[in-house]
Image: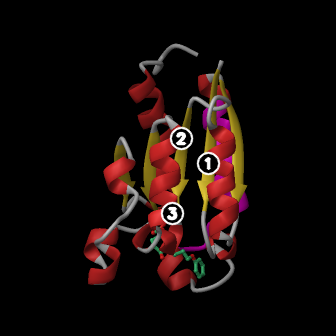
Amino acid sequence: MTKMLILNGPNLNLLGQRQPEIYGTTTLADIEDMCRAKAEALGVTLTFLQSNAEGALIDAIHGARGVENGIILNAGAYTHTSVALMDAIASAELPVVELHLSNIHAREAFRHKSFIAPVAVGQICGFGPAGYPLAIDALMAHLGRLGTP
Ligand code: CA2
C-alpha cells in the first residue's frame, strides 16, 4: 500500500472563502475530497494537512521520513522564501512533488523563484485544484506504481 502526505502551507485554509477572483471558489475541504477519491481509486493511503506555520510544515516533513512513500507539497508563499523547508525536504529522503494552484512563472517575479524546485522530483502548477489529483498520479508514476495499487 502506498502512503502519501499532502501538505499545504500558509493561507491555503482560506481557499474558496477569500479572494475568489484570484484563487477560485473551491475550498481546501473540496480539494481534500478530490484527493481522497483519487487516492481510493489508486489504493493510496492519504494524510492531508495544512498549516500556516513554517515549523509545523518542517515537523510534518521530518515525521514523514520512513512513514510515507512520498510528499505532495504546496508550500504557498514559503515556496519563495524558505531555505528551512528546502533543507527539510533534502533530509527527508522522500520524493516530493511541488504543487501550486496558479502558474507561479506567469505571476510576479518574486514568485518565479522556488526553494522547493531544486529538491523536488518535479513541479505541477497552473492547473488550479485539478493539479492535486495530477500530483497524485505524478508521484505514483515516479514511484513506478501507476496502475498497480
Ligand atoms: O498557486 C499556489 O498554489 C501558491 O502556492 C499559492 C500561494 C502563493 O503565495 C504562491 O506564490 C502560489 C498563496 C496561497 C494563498 O491562498 C489564499 C487563498 C484564498 C485567499 C487568500 C489567499
User: Going from the N terminus, do you reach mark 3 or mark 1 first?
Assistant: 1
> Three-letter amino acid code at disc 3?
Ala
Q: Quadrant of the rendered structure where residue 25 is?
A: bottom right
Is 38 above or below relative to 33? Answer: above
Is 66 above or below relative to 23? Answer: above
Q: Secondary structure at mark 2?
A: helix
Q: Are marks 2 and 1 in contact (CB under 8 Å)?
A: yes
Q: Secondary structure at mark 3?
A: helix
Q: Residue 34: within the magenta?
A: yes
Q: Is residue 134 visible?
A: no
The spot of residue 113 in percent (x, y) is 30, 70
> Three-letter amino acid code at disc 2?
Ala
Which residue corresponds to mark 1? Answer: 61
Which residue corresponds to mark 3? Answer: 84
Which residue corresponds to mark 2? Answer: 92
The spot of residue 114 in percent (x, y) is 35, 65
Q: Which residues are magenta?
A: 24-39
Q: Residue 95: within the magenta?
A: no
The spot of residue 15 in percent (x, y) is 63, 73
Is 33 above or below relative to 81? Answer: above
Depth check, front residue: 74 or 66: 66
Q: Are marks 3 and 1 in contact (CB under 8 Å)?
A: no
